[in-house]
Amino acid sequence: MQATSMLSALPPEIIDEIFSHLMDASGGRRTLKSCALVCCSFLHPARARLFRRLAVRNGSDRSRFCRLAQEAPHLISCIRNLYINGFGLFLGDTELPQALEHFVHGINGPPRAHLQEVTLDNMSWPDLSPQTQLVLLKLLACEFLHRVALDNIDDFPVQHFSAALKSLRINNTRFPARFRWPATSQRLPELEWLTVNLCPSKYQGQTLDILLQKFTNCIVDVKRLRVFNVFSCNKFTWSTYRRSIYTVSRSLEQLHIQTLSPSRHTDYLC
């Protein structure tokens, strides 16, 4: 009892640091669940670690998250990293968009959670319900969002991201052939980390050139980019990527280029 009192008297920063190491250890989740039952001083930091990441990968994950949003919405405030796979989304679904709204705004006030990272994976955008499309776009504009990954998405509409965004990954994602670029009246996020892996068969020559040029002028600011990763680079796309590299050369600290050829992959690290 005395040992517990001494531990609970520690500053919150120290307790949080200890719990951060517990999460990475073997059996960390089980240990954190036990810590949450020890005392009030342990409850919040343990809970924050247990619910820091949320993954909606399939129908089962979707059902659990929707139940969490209904029965314990206060726990959503702990979530910082959100991963959503298209396998967890259903056409005409209204329950999941309502649950995701908790990240955008609370029932009677500000957002319940301060999301820092969002990953969208394996989606066909036209197949999503209008409600799902709308709430996902709102998520990508959340005030405190620092990292976004768009993986394997078809016909993703180009839109504004959070002004706090620092890291963006575009991996095998296709944008609509015809779309209107958003107005640039608002402050663009100043990226520090950009990863681009666009399928050469989808974007070749001038189409990719225009896409990257518009993207870096209307959607993000790359003048302070520190890390630039380019994948699936070939003879059709190299000239476009080279122009992008020149644009950010003054601030760039790390450049990784992976060339794609019929016979081999070649990596260049600068």
Image (spheres, rainbow, N blue to C red):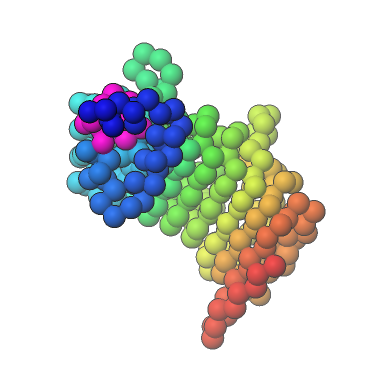
The range drawn in magenta is 35-46
**Image quadrant in which you'd find residue 179:** top right
- The secondary structure that most of the magenta stretch takes on is helix
The image shows residue 126, relative to residue 96, as above or below, that is below
Residue at x 40%, y 15% (from the top left corner): 109
Q: Is residue 111 left or right of residue 94?
A: right
Q: From the top left corner, tell me how far across and down residue 197 is, in percent.
A: 55, 62
In terms of image quadrants, where is residue 75? top left
Q: Is residue 33 visible?
A: yes
Left or right of 99: which side holds 63?
left
Above or below for 132 versus 58 = above
Q: 162 or 136, which lies in front?
A: 162
Locate the N terminus and report the quarter of the image it occupies.
top left
Q: Could you tell whether 163 is left or right of 213 in the image?
A: left
Q: Residue 58 location in percent, x, y?
A: 25, 50
Q: Quadrant of the C terminus?
A: bottom right
The image shows residue 111, relative to residue 56, as above or below, that is above
Could you say where residue 150 lies in the image, as x and y percent from the top left?
47, 50
Q: Looking at the image, is 256 positioned above or below residue 154?
A: below
Residue nearer the viewer, 106 or 238: 106
Residue 238: x %, y % from top left: 68, 69
Q: Judge from the rendering whether residue 233 lies leftward or rightward of residue 128; answer left or right.
A: right
Q: Is residue 41 found inside the magenta-colored segment of the image?
A: yes
Q: Residue furthest bottom?
A: 263
Q: Residue furthest front?
A: 2
Q: Residue at x 61, y 53 (%)?
A: 194
* Residue at 73% over, 64% down: 242
* The magenta stretch spans residue 227: no
Q: Residue furthest top?
A: 108
Q: Name the residue: 53% across, 29% down.
A: 143
Q: Is residue 76 visible?
A: no
